[in-house]
Amino acid sequence: MNSTLTGVPAPPFGHLLRMTDDTGLFEHASGCQPALEHGYCVDDVARGLAIISREPDPAPELTRAARVYLRFLAQAQAQDGRFTNRLGHDGRWRGDPTTEDHWGRALWGLGTAAARGPGGALREEARERFERGARLPTPFPHAITFAALGAAEVLAGWPGHPGALTVLGRVREVIGEPPDDPGWPWPGQRLTYASAAIAEAVIAAGAGLGDDRLLDGGLRMLDWLLSLCTRGGHLSVVPVGGWDAIDISPGFDQQPIEVAALADACARAAAVTGDQRWLAGTGSCVAWYLGANDAGTVMLNEQTGGGYDGLKPDRPNPNQGAESTLAMICVLQHARSLARLAPEHLPAR
């Protein structure tokens, strides 16, 4: 794995490519080997498309992977815009198309690829498929959260885009504004998973719609969550069992998706407000991967290029599945940006 001048590893893609075949991206791994029996899912393929689309100059093999991922999403999308999530290694789709979380992640990946993907043809198809999915409402908060992140990408590339504005408008309806309670300023009774993405979606919606009240609410949510997840000078993120107002004690397993969502949200807050102090939170996410966490252990494998599946009390989960590997790449992409914009927030190594 190559390193940047700061000593922080550069985003590695070798393991991601190992997990990718001509069909899609395998969901799970046993150690660093793809677990073929578990097949593929839209959730991870969409994340993979978004992460590759964020690369400023992707290598040819990454461009090929992005095309595979887009083709997978095209096959998963029904004519009405919904998505079926799971495909077995036997080539058979499992379940029916819905607008649940994987639909939102598909729009996230498609929106990012439409705005930043490698190649004009890929960007055009991604935008068309985003538009097909964006017509649909959803009652699920996480689904509209992820869809809004894709909509924000589309809106940046096509100001006034009606489908993107429609999706952002639904954030207020489905997620709601945070309550005024300083002890629990969260639009829900529980923190479950990818919590910072919810705050980011509210920030993105407020900025995209020109709604300062909504924007301020999203920033307040993120500030509170970041404080909640910082203990002893390092991140201690929401565990797999979640948190509520009664129990906010450190817990395990801690999932890398929480760290990646925090890194994304802090970067969004800095971009929207122009206040680079938010990037200290992104730096804490980088540090979490390098060992500044509750177990004091490194959460990436520099030999394989994979990200570990979770943080246990004393060690990482050694499996290196797609979600965790993509979360690690996401955070190291932010580290690369920090090296350019705010190197003071990068951890020493």
Image: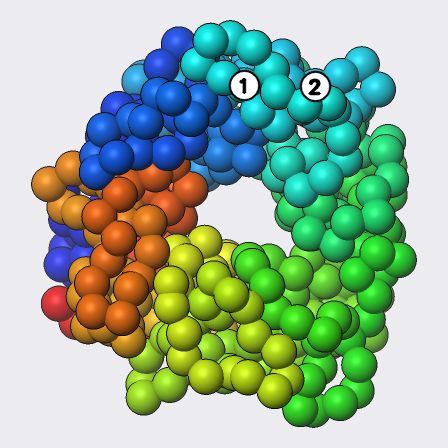
CB under 8 Å between discs 1 and 2: no
Q: Quadrant of the N terminus?
A: top left
**Frontmost residue, 211 versus 167:** 167
Q: Which residue is mark 2?
A: 77
Q: Earlier in the sequence, mark 1 or mark 2?
A: 2
Question: Which quarter of the picture shows residue 199?
Answer: bottom right
Whole-percent x, y for residue 264 in the image: 50, 57
Relative to 67, does residue 219 appear above or below in the rendering? below
**Frontmost residue, 148 versus 346:** 148
Residue at left 14%, top 46%? Answer: 302
**Frontmost residue, 91 versus 163:** 91
Determine which of the numbered discs, if any, sits on residue 87 in the image.
1
Whole-percent x, y for residue 312 in the image: 29, 64
**Frontmost residue, 205 versus 34:** 34
Question: Which quarter of the picture shows residue 306?
Answer: top left
Q: Secondary structure at mark 1?
A: strand
The amino acid sitting under disc 1 is Leu
Relative to 256, does residue 301 appear above or below in the rendering? above
**Outermost residue, bottom side:** 182
The amino acid sitting under disc 2 is Gln
Whole-percent x, y for residue 341 in the image: 37, 62
Relative to 163, does residue 264 appear above or below in the rendering? below
Around disc 1, counting alpha carbons within 10 Å, would you say few (fewer than 14), some (14 to 19), or many (20 or more)? many
Along the horizontal axis of the image, is 122 left or right of 137? left
Asked if one can make out residue 250 in the rendered structure from this viewpoint, the answer is yes
Q: Quadrant of the C terminus?
A: bottom left
Along the horizontal axis of the image, is 136 left or right of 76? right
Whole-percent x, y for residue 126 in the image: 64, 22
Residue at left 89%, top 58%? Answer: 173
Residue at left 71%, top 46%? Answer: 143
Determine which of the numbered discs, if any, sits on residue 241 in the image.
none
Q: How many marks?
A: 2
